[in-house]
Image (cartoon, rainbow, N blue to C red):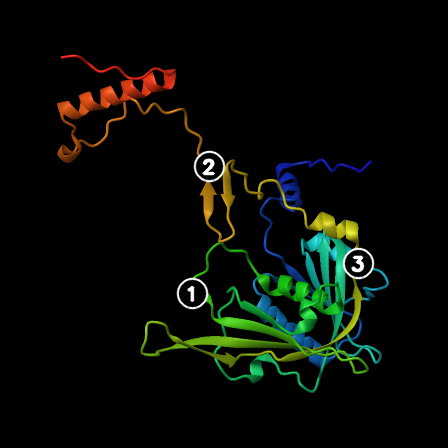
Amino acid sequence: MLREIKPKNARSKRALEKKAPQVHENPRTTLFLRGTSSSQILQLAMIDLIALKRPFATKFTKKNEIHPFESATSLEFFSEKNDASLLVFGHHSKKRPHSLTFVRCFDHKVLDMLELYIDPESFRTLSQFKNTKCAVGLKPLIAFSGTPFESPTQTKYTLAKSLLLDFFRGQEAGTVDVEGLQYMVHISAGEEVEGEPAPQIHLRVYLIKTKRSGQKLPRVEVEEMGPRIDFRVGREKMPEEAAWKEALKKPKGLEPKTKKNIETDIIGDKVGRIHVGKQDFGNLQTRKIKGLKRTRGEIDGDDETLLDEEDTEEGTSPKRERR
């Protein structure tokens, strides 16, 4: 049996209700940690990622003796203590230089993680690009380019796409102002070729600028804002099937209610079926037009024709009327 925690006062009750599962979850908070040894490149990269992630980012400065792929107990403790569903752990060693480990948790348990190695030769910080920066808290446009991200089977690149998409997603919003789209995150990877090293993942961030075009629509240009990071793919931990299925469940409050007799056709139009009662057309009032009005003689002629047809059906010949 699971131990049920009973709150002792109103403050602890509110804290437990805040941590409990909700229909509309709060934005994903990312916790940045560092290992026992770290490099200057690794620290600069983490500072730039925090700048892009603000205000949903928390950084720990102390060194932590953690080995994520050997034991994830400490990461789960930090996740529950700080209510963070994403963690980024930086560690540097001779065997795995400039390593960033992206960890995703569900119910404060490690769901999956991926290790990425920073290429120090192509690395450029946010401050090395001398231009204006985007405002804090804006939602970015996210684009992925490359066939490795579209693989039908689960690979390291599909895992990287899912993790990076959750990392840069930010706060959910029903509508977004066009003026708020100020920057774009572009993530690309080359083709996978047998016998050659795995392709790198290229992370680029661009500013979006609109200029006059002389027409109704403005001319859109992009300018690199930084940081510029190239990753090599390292170790990975795929999610377990049962935990992944549980994490993808939608609460009942978010599922739209089904409406009867309403369907959507192939084109995408909404088609409805209406049930009405039996209609009596005998008393239906139609439009009266003078040209369609029949005279008295036409009405009598129609009656005689109906009588002649009834006599013929009974097998008797019609009789002539004597005058």
Q: Is mark 2 on a helix, strand or loop?
A: loop
Mark 1 Cα-neighbour bin, 10 Å: few <14, some 14–19, many ≥20: few
The amino acid on which the numbered mark 3 sits, given as a three-letter code, is Ser
Name, please, the residue furthest toward the right. Answer: 70
The amino acid on which the numbered mark 2 sits, given as a three-letter code, is Arg
Tell which tag, 3 or 2, sits nearer the viewer.
2
Q: What element carries label 1?
A: helix
Residue 295 marker: none
Relative horizontal placement of residue 318, taking residue 151 as reference (left or right): left
Q: Mark 3 points at which residue?
A: 74
Name, please, the residue furthest toward the top. Answer: 322
Residue 273 marker: 2
What residue is drawn where x is 63% and y is 58%?
Answer: 29
Q: Name the residue under label 1.
A: 178
Q: Is mark 3 on a helix, strand or loop?
A: helix
The amino acid on which the numbered mark 1 sits, given as a three-letter code, is Val
Mark 3–mark 2 distance (CA, rounded to whole Å): 58 Å
What residue is drawn where x is 50% and y is 36%?
Answer: 261
Contact check, label 1 and label 3, Cβ < 8 Å: no
Note whether residue 25 is visible: yes
Residue 1 lies, in percent from the top left, at 82, 35
